[in-house]
Image (cartoon, rainbow, N blue to C red):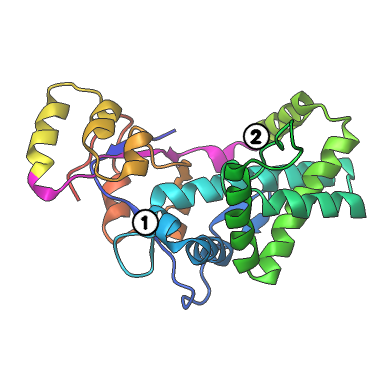
């Protein structure tokens, strides 16, 4: 497993006019298309551009923030693995599970949208109601195809839970079996971290790292991207080496990170 720490600002570039793009990820033969990621990112920005625009849009035209998109993709990968497990168990969602799945997906895009109602009134709190409204706007902004795809993924998870008598440990054990049966797609992973600063501040950061300070701690202190700073520089889901090209990273990034050894810091980008 290869990991690297990079002193760079990473973004994902994904333009809908790029015909024939490879999938964003492939899980057990199931593709998560780059177009799905495009649709989800666009839906977030359309629903609440003031909040989500700065969180998910990159620095250049038609680019996405790496951390935000990796978080979206990571969730989809987990749900896709669960869908594969559901198929193996012969778990087929019924109509009630599909209805429940649609409600769950509608309230899955904004933290707090799925909060329990106020025990005194039985109604959502003001914060939950606001979160539900925004999350619903994201859902409605998706294309019908993406909405149906997300609902189908969540419905298969509900059917799997029913089939295995709601034992999450068994789901975890079966997911582990999938990994151990063919770990190849999970090897040669690039788990990137970043310190994002103005160019004038790069030498001072390099001096601190050369003196032995922890990369994550420095990133948390000085990174100007709030989301990356809060994550201690972590840029989200690790990427298999053979999928670096599919992420359409900013020019020069792939060549920069591929030679890195675990714990090694790249040149500034």
Image coordinates for residue 19, horizontal then vertical, percent: 51, 77
Residue at 44% x, 63% y: name it.
49
What residue does disc 2 label? Answer: 179
Say which of 188 and 76 sits in front: 76
- Give the image quarter of residue 59: bottom left
Residue 251 visible, this orientation? yes
Quadrant including the N terminus: top left
Image coordinates for residue 18, horizontal then vertical, percent: 46, 75
Report whether 139 appears left or right of 215: right
Q: Determine the residue located farthest toward the top in the rendered image.
A: 212
- Identify the secondary structure beneath mark 2: helix
Q: Mark 2 Cα within 10 Å, few/some/many (few <14, many 20+)? A: some
Residue at 48% x, 45% y: name it.
240
Residue 94 visible, this orientation? no
* Front disc: 2 or 1: 1
The tag earlier along the polypeptide, 2 or 1, is 1
- Identify the secondary structure beneath mark 1: helix
Asked if residue 190 is among those painted magenta in the image, a careful observer would answer yes
**Position of 210 relative to 128 (above/below):** above
**Position of 82 relative to 34 (above/below):** above
Say which of 210 and 188 sits in front: 210
Magenta stretch in the rendered image: 182-200
Q: Mark 1 Cα within 10 Å, few/some/many (few <14, many 20+)? A: some
Report whether 189 appears left or right of 249: right
What residue does disc 1 label? Answer: 54
Image coordinates for residue 263, horizontal then vertical, percent: 30, 29
């Amino acid at each position: 497993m290869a990991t690297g720490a990079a002193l760079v600002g990473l973004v994902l570039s994904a333009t809908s006019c790029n015909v024939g793009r490879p999938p964003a990820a492939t899980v057990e033969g199931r593709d998560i298309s780059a177009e799905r990621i495009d649709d989800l990112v666009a839906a977030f920005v359309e629903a609440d551009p003031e909040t989500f625009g700065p969180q998910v849009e990159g620095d250049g035209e038609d680019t996405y923030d790496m951390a935000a998109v990796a978080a979206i993709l990571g969730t989809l990968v987990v749900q896709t693995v669960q869908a594969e497990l559901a198929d193996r168990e012969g778990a087929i969602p019924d109509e009630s599970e599909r209805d429940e799945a649609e409600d769950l997906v509608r309230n899955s895009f904004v933290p707090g949208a799925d909060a329990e109602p106020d025990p005194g009134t039985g109604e959502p709190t003001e914060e939950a109601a606001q979160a539900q409204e925004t999350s619903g706007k994201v859902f409605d902004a998706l294309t019908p195809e993406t909405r149906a795809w997300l609902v189908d993924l969540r419905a298969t998870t509900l059917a799997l839970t029913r089939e295995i008598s709601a034992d999450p440990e068994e789901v975890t054990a079966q997911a582990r079996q999938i990994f151990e049966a063919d770990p190849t797609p999970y090897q040669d992973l690039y788990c990137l971290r970043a310190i994002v600063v103005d160019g004038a501040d790069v030498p001072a950061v390099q001096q601190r790292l050369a003196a032995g300070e922890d990369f994550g701690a420095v990133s948390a202190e000085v990174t100007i991207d709030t989301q990356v700073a809060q994550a201690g520089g972590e840029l989200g889901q690790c990427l298999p080496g053979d999928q670096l090209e599919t992420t359409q990273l900013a020019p020069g990034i792939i060549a920069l990170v591929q030679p890195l050894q675990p714990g090694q810091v790249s040149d500034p980008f």
